[in-house]
Image: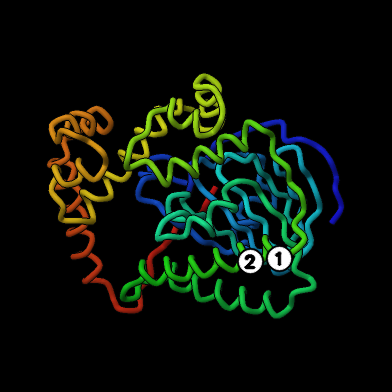
């Protein structure tokens, strides 16, 4: 690997999956073929940033020039690059580059008791060279081939299978970070603080700690935490807390049968009526109306899918 220096000059926040109108709350994971995506973009991805999404690029062939904040290097396959949300990154691919790019919501990375695995991957980016690990490369390629097939298909229990395979992938990558010589892609103190806050928020959001409580736990001032959050997320620390609570409320309303009152108590609200007002202020809809609209939409989607031939697949939009 050769460090080429340089700093990205333009920071963009592209619409993930190429859809500016997508409901990001519902988009937990995406996987795509690196070669196809590189060809679509002319083998060049300008420096940009994703909010609250971990990207894992697994290169199995070719090479590329990689930019991670102020770090720049030529990266040769086989290798794995992990990029937490909030880190500016860009690529210039060599023609014929092969592999996969996996995009995972931070909340999914940290869910299911996987905090010890996911937190280190969200604190700093890593570049892992695998030329001396042929057996591991073979195992990861087999895993990603299966993961891509499951993601792109429409088989029974597809979501459960994809999430299970993702957890295996995260464990593989976490072990490599711990055991291999990872290139030092150091991040500034502000970004490290933001990533630490984001990881802490994921564990504690249901208790709704105050910004002051988070600041004390992170050994920083209230104003600094707010400033850092505005730089890397576009909103204050308080807005991030409220946004995460809103996401969880939406998910429970759509995917569970819990009442609005039960959801309110599970998210730290003392009064269900205050939860309803909070939810309407955040979404423009009451919890009951939101549930009815989304349950109806899921039923229509399910009915339509039953009319499709068994061999049909779901077409996925690309990640920007």
**The quarter of the displayed image where residue 187 is located:** top right
Residue 298 is left or right of residue 107, and the answer is: left
Residue 38 is left or right of residue 268, and the answer is: right
Residue 276 lies, in percent from the top left, at 17, 33
The residue tagged 1 is 179
Residue 207 lies, in percent from the top left, at 32, 40
Residue 21 lies, in percent from the top left, at 38, 40
- 10 Å neighbourhood of mark 2: few (<14), some, or many (≥20)? few
What residue is drawn where x is 31% and y is 45%?
248
**Closer-to-camera residue (290/315):** 290
Of helix, strand and loop, which one carries label 1? helix
As measured in the structure, the alpha-carbon distance from the residue carrying label 1 to the one carrying label 2 is 6 Å
Of helix, strand and loop, which one carries label 2? helix
Residue 138 lies, in percent from the top left, at 66, 79
- 10 Å neighbourhood of mark 1: few (<14), some, or many (≥20)? few
The residue tagged 2 is 175
**Closer-to-camera residue (99/114):** 114
The answer to whether residue 184 is above or below residue 139 is above
The N terminus - image quarter: bottom right
Q: Are marks 1 and 2 in contact (CB under 8 Å)?
A: yes
What residue is drawn where x is 42% and y is 33%?
240
User: Is residue 193 visible to the viewer in this orientation of the structure?
Assistant: yes
What number of labels is visible?
2
**Closer-to-camera residue (43/290):** 290
């Amino acid at each position: 690997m050769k460090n080429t220096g340089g700093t990205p000059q333009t920071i963009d926040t592209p619409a993930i999956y190429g859809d500016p109108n997508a409901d990001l709350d519902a988009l937990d994971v995406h996987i795509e073929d690196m070669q196809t995506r590189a060809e679509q973009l002319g083998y060049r991805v300008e420096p940009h940033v994703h909010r609250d999404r971990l990207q894992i690029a697994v290169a199995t062939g070719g090479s590329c020039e990689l930019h991670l904040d102020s770090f720049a290097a030529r990266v040769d396959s086989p290798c794995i690059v992990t990029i937490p949300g909030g880190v500016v990154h860009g690529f210039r691919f060599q023609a014929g580059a092969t592999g996969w790019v996996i995009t995972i919501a931070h909340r999914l990375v940290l869910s299911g008791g996987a905090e010890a695995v996911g937190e280190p991957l969200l604190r700093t980016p890593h570049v892992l060279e695998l030329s001396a690990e042929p057996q591991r490369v073979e195992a990861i390629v087999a895993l990603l081939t299966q993961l891509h097939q499951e993601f792109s298909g429409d088989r029974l229990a597809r979501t459960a299978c994809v999430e299970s395979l993702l957890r295996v992938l995260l464990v593989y990558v976490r072990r490599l970070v711990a055991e291999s010589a990872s290139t030092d892609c150091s991040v500034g103190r502000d970004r490290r603080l933001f990533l630490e806050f984001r990881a802490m928020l994921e564990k504690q959001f249901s208790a709704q700690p105050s910004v002051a409580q988070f600041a004390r736990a992170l050994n920083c001032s209230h104003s600094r935490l707010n400033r850092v959050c505005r730089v890397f997320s576009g909103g204050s620390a308080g807005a991030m807390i409220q946004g995460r609570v809103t996401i969880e409320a939406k998910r429970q309303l759509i995917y569970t049968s819990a009442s609005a009152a039960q959801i309110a108590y599970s998210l730290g609200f003392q009064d269900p009526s205050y939860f309803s007002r909070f939810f309407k202020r955040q979404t423009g809809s009451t919890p009951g109306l939101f549930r009815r609209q989304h349950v109806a939409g899921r039923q229509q989607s399910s009915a339509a899918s039953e009319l499709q031939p068994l061999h049909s697949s779901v077409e996925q939009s690309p990640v920007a």
